[in-house]
Amino acid sequence: MLQLVIFLVFGALCVAGAVNLLVQRHPINSALSLIVVMASLAVEFLLLGAEFVAAVQVIIYAGAIMVLFVFVIMLLNAGEEEATKGSRVAMLLGVPAVVVGSGLVAWVLVEHSSAQSAEALLGAPRTIGWMLFHEFLLPFEITSVLVLIAIIGAVVLASRLDTSTPEPGSRAAQLDKMGSVGQLREAGSPVEPVGAQNRRQG
Amino acid sequence: MLSVTTFVIVSVIKTVIAIFVLLTAVAYSVWLERKVVGHIQNRWGPTRVGPFGLLQPLADGVKFLMKEDLTPPYVYKPLYIAAPMIAVIFALTSIAVIPVGNWVNIGSIQTPLQITDVNIGLLIVLGITSMGVYGVALAGWSSNSKYSLLGSLRASAQMVSYEIALGLSLIGVLIMSGSFSLREIVDAQAGHFWGFIPNWNVFRGQEVAFFIYLMAAFAETNRVPFDLPEAETELVAGYHTEYSAMKFAMFFMAEYANMITVACLASLLFLGGWHGPLFGPHILQEILPLFWFFLRVFGFLFLYIWIRGTLPRFRYDQLMNFGWKFLFPLAVTNLVITALIVALKS
C-alpha cells in the first residue's frame, strides 16, 4: 500500500518534470526538470527492487551527464528559447503524435503484457554482475568497444581544430601557453565578457 | 522484525540524533579549523567567547542569522535561492547510510547505529555527492557575476574530473570485500593478521587506493590545495561571492558536512570503521567502537586542517593534469592489480 502511494507520487513527479521540461523557456530550467525526471525514475527503480539500476541512474544520468548539460548551458550562456516557424509546426504536429504514440504504448501494455511480479526482476548488484559477465558477456564487450570508439572519436574531433599552429608571439600563441584558455578559444566559444551574458530583464 | 510504529519511531529518533550530531560536528569543525590554523600560524585563534573560544560557533550562528540577507538585483532569483538549499540538503542526506557502530539493544528493540542499512550504501553516498555539485554550479550561474561563474565552472569541472579517480579507487575496496553495503565492508575488516596488524583495507594492499581517495576527496570537497573554486586571491570568494548571511552560512555548512562525510567514508572503507581494541566492563565495550570511529573521523578532519595550514594552492592546469594524467591512470592500475590478485587467490 505504502509502496503504491510512493510509486504514484514519484510517477506524478516524473511526468510533471517531463512536462515542465517542455514548457520552460530557459534551457537551465529545462535541464533542471530533466534532473527531477531522472531522480524520480531512480526512485521508481528502487521501488521495483532494482536498487543497482536506481543508483546507477542517479550517479550516471543525474550526476554526470546532467552536470555536463548544465555545464555546457552555463559555458555557452544560452539565452531564452525563441519560438520560430519550425517550432510552431513541430508543436502542431508533435502534440497529436505524442498523444497517439503514448496511447499505442498504453494499449500494448494493457492488452498484451504478461504481468510480472517485482520479485521476478533481478536487480541486486551481484546478479547484474553475474549476468553481465556470463550470459551477456559478448554484447557487454561490444558495447564497451563502441563506447571506446565514441571516446576516441570525440578526442580526434576535439584535437583536429588544434592542428593549425599559431604564429609565435601572436595573441593566439600567448593564449595557448595558458593551456585551458587556448582550448576554450579553439572550441569556438564566444569571447564575450562573462558578466554581460546571462543578464536578463527584471 | 520490528512493527511499523516502532520502526518509524526508532527511525525518527535516529535521524534527529544523527542530524544533531552532524550539525554540531560541522559547527565545531569550523572552531577546530580556526584554532588549529591559528596555532600553525603562531596565533591563538578564537579565545574570547567562552573557555578556549568554545562558544564561538554559537556566536557565529547568531551572527549569520541576524545579518542582513542581501539579494543583489541582477541575480536569477529562483535558482539563487535554491542553490544553497540544494548544497546543504545533499550534504546532509548522505549521513543517512553511514554506519557509526555495531547493533545495539534497547529493551527488546534491536537496531543498527545507522539511520538505514541499505545494501547499496556506498553507491547511494556516491550518487548523493555527485548531485551535490548542482548547488555549487547553480549558485555561480544564477549569481550572474563573473567571479561566481568562474568559481562554479571550476568547481563543476573539478568535481566531475576527480569523481572518476575517486570512484575507481573505491572499486578496489569493493572487490576485496565483495559488497556495496558499508556495514559488510567494515565487517570484512575485522580481526588481525600476523598476530598484530589490523585487518584494515589500507594494510591489505589498498595503500595506493587510499592515497588516491585522499587526494580526490580533497578535490571533491573543494579544500586546500584544491580550493580553486573559491580561491579568494583571484575570485573574491568564488561561487558564493554574491551570497550573504544565512545563505552564505549554508554553503559553509555544506562544505564542512561534506568534509565529515568524506572522513567517515575513509574511516569505513580503508581504516576498519569502528574496529579497535575492546576492554573494560560491558558498558565501556559498548561505547568503545563509537569512540574508535569518531577518533578516526577526528583524525581525518585534523589532517584536512593541517594540510590547509601547510600547503599552497594548485594552479588550475596543474590540478587538471594531476587528476587526469596521474590519479586516473594510477587508479586504473590499482584496480587491475587488485582484481588480478583477488582472482588468483580465489
Image (tube, coloured by chain):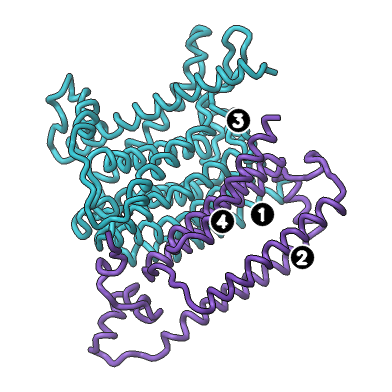
Disc 1 on helix, strand or loop? helix
Disc 4 on helix, strand or loop? helix
> Relative to the observer, which residue lies in front, A90 or B232?
A90
Which residue is disc 4 drawn over? A19
What is the x, y in percent for residue B269? Answer: 53, 39
The answer to which of marks 4 and 2 sits earlier in the sequence is: 4
Amino acid type, callout 3: Asp
What is the x, y in percent for residue B1? Answer: 70, 18
Q: CA distance from mark 2 to mark 3?
A: 34 Å
Which residue is disc 2 drawn over? A139
Q: Name the mark on residue B117.
A: 3
Is A134 situated left or right of B299 in this image? right
Q: Residue at x 63, y 65 (%)?
A: A95
Disc 2 on helix, strand or loop? helix
Nearest to viewer (mark 2 / mark 1):
2
Amino acid type, callout 1: Leu
Same subunit: marks 4 and 2 = yes
Pointer 2 local density, CA inside 10 Å: few below 14, some 14–19, many at least 20: few
Q: Which chain is cyan?
A: B
| Residue B53 against residue B210 in the figure, above or below | above
Q: CA distance from mark 2 to mark 1?
A: 23 Å
- Residue A105 location, quadrant: bottom right
Amino acid type, callout 4: Val
Q: Name the mark on residue B340.
A: 1
Same subunit: marks 1 and 3 = yes
